[in-house]
Amino acid sequence: MNNFLKITALATLTIPAILFAEDDEFFTPKSTIGGYGELHYNHSKADGSDAEKILDFHRFVLFYSHAWTPKWSFKSEVELEHNFVKEGQGELELEQAYIDYHHSDEFGFQVGVVLPSVGLINEWHEPPLFLSVERPSYSKNIIPTTWFGNGAAIYGNVKGFDYKFTVMEGLDATGFSSSGIRSGRQKGFESNAEDLLYNFRLNYTGVNGLLVGTSFSYNNATHVDSSSNNSVSLFEFHAKYDANNFVGVFELGNITYGEPDLIGGVESSFGYYLDLGYNVGSFMNCDTKIIPFFRWEDYNTAAKTEAGGDSEKANHLTTWMVGLSVKPIDQVVFKVDYGVSKNELSDAKTKMFNFGAGYMF
Amino acid sequence: MKFSNFYILLLLFTLTGNVFSSIKNDAETSIKNIFGEESTLTFEKFKLQNELKNSIEKEAKQKFFRDEVYLWKITKNDSSLGFAILDNVLGKAMPITFLIIFDKEAKILSSEIIKYREAYGGQVGNRNWNEQFIGRNAESSFTVGKDVDGISGATISVNSVSKGIQKLCILAKAIKEKP
């Protein structure tokens, strides 16, 4: 790909915006802050071992943004995980930091640290926006949420169709394994830019309360330590309905690997989950949303392997969960859930009980 | 797609997107669409008196963006057809400019987002979403998720705009009673 063309394209976009003054009497340049956070209590007990109890302020996040003009702004998200950072414990991450040019409803672009648009939770992960205490396992093991990196994106909305096309740093194939691609994220740390990630997402939001969409991502992932590549193609479908007191969520994703031999014969990863909830607060005529929910989740990071047989069962987990999500206001949530997950090969079960409190602003 | 094609596409987007129209003109076009070309629009910047402003803010649980709104009174052959109010609410970081058109009884005839400035949450501009407000007035409820449908991925905008519309309904009632 021609670098000169890429730069010229950017220049062409920016010049008209600079030449034409903007007529907007309501806009004033300003900075804003926002954020979210979540405290978790996790109690988990695997077959044959003692219960593990953890009290964790999992995420503390600050958004900082500044708008110079109605079209030109800067957005950022800094995240502190697990309270403090020391020798591999806890994480301090710059998950978003980009210049945004919002040309019109139909077209805009972002350059900096960006989020690829994959699944429902990668871009929208504030705790009041999902039902369970922890994010769904699918959103960790199939979609490596939060997936961020250095790059650029174009986006817009045309007749109810919302699109985003992202080009950013690729994955490091050294991190791929029978556990999926999660450990391959470079997280913007002096990222190897040998082979970039291309991600395209299309959402439809024309029906009130409904969001339905799909994305496709491709990266001919480099082994940062050697010269061999292992390409990954990630296809996913997502839908969410949240209206008339009903909440329904469904996500499904599949990853195929170009060079199974490099990761113990794993050819593909696959998973899905379904959430069903209902705001029973509506029966009591109170403004607090009280949403009991049920989840079924199924994922297998080595769903298809060259060897087949048990190797396709070893990483297969199914989970059922019931829980309650209570929102006194839309920005504050208290959650409790209980679930049991089972490994297909060993039949080993893990029981989980979680409590959480979260906020966003 | 070859990158050169992509470049041409970007160029086209840029050149064709720069059609200039002011917020006020856009609003007046929308008002004429409802009441017809023959209707007469009388524009004023309506100052919000402190007492009224405070009581509306308390009821809708949202501050006004400024201490004035844009107000049009619509008449035809000297008889009143209704009125329209343009105001702003804050989205995540930027103002969202919206227009509510009322009949002469201060009931909503139309709700429209005139200008959305953020990268995300622009779905509050969807016609379907705005149509749910038609027929509401100062006595209606505006609780998101219960009385107002939410939009996944636009939580903040939906909450903000819904409260903004409620504020204008209460204001419209006051304007109707004390023109």
Image (cartoon, coloured by chain):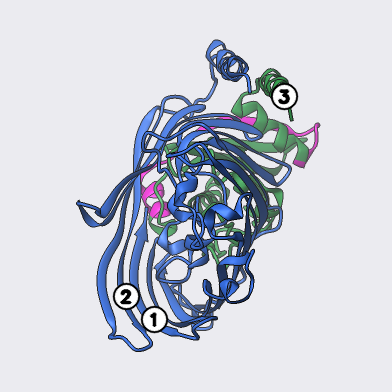
Chain colours: A blue, B green
Name the amino acid, label 1: Met
The chain under label 1 reads A
Residue labelled with disc 2:
A42
Quarter of the picture containing the N terminus of chain B is top right
Q: Quadrant of residue A135?
A: bottom left
Residue labelled with disc 1:
A352
Farthest residue toward the top? A19
Instruction: Classify B154 as above or below A68.
Output: below
Q: CA distance from mark 3 to mark 2?
A: 50 Å
Residue plotted at (58% across, 18% down): A3
Residue labelled with disc 3:
B9
Callout 2: few (<14), some (14-19), or many (20+) C-alpha neighbours within 10 Å? some
User: On the rendered structure, is A60 left or right of A321?
Assistant: left
- The span shown in magenta is B34-57
Q: CA distance from mark 3 to mark 1?
A: 51 Å
The chain under label 2 reads A
The answer to whether the residue labelled 2 contacts the one labelled 1, judged by CB atoms less than 8 Å apart, is: yes
The reply to whether the magenta stretch includes residue A136 is no
Label 3, secondary structure: give it: helix
Name the amino acid, label 2: Asn
Q: Position of residue A349 (x, y in %)?
A: 44, 85
Residue plotted at (26% across, 67% down): A56
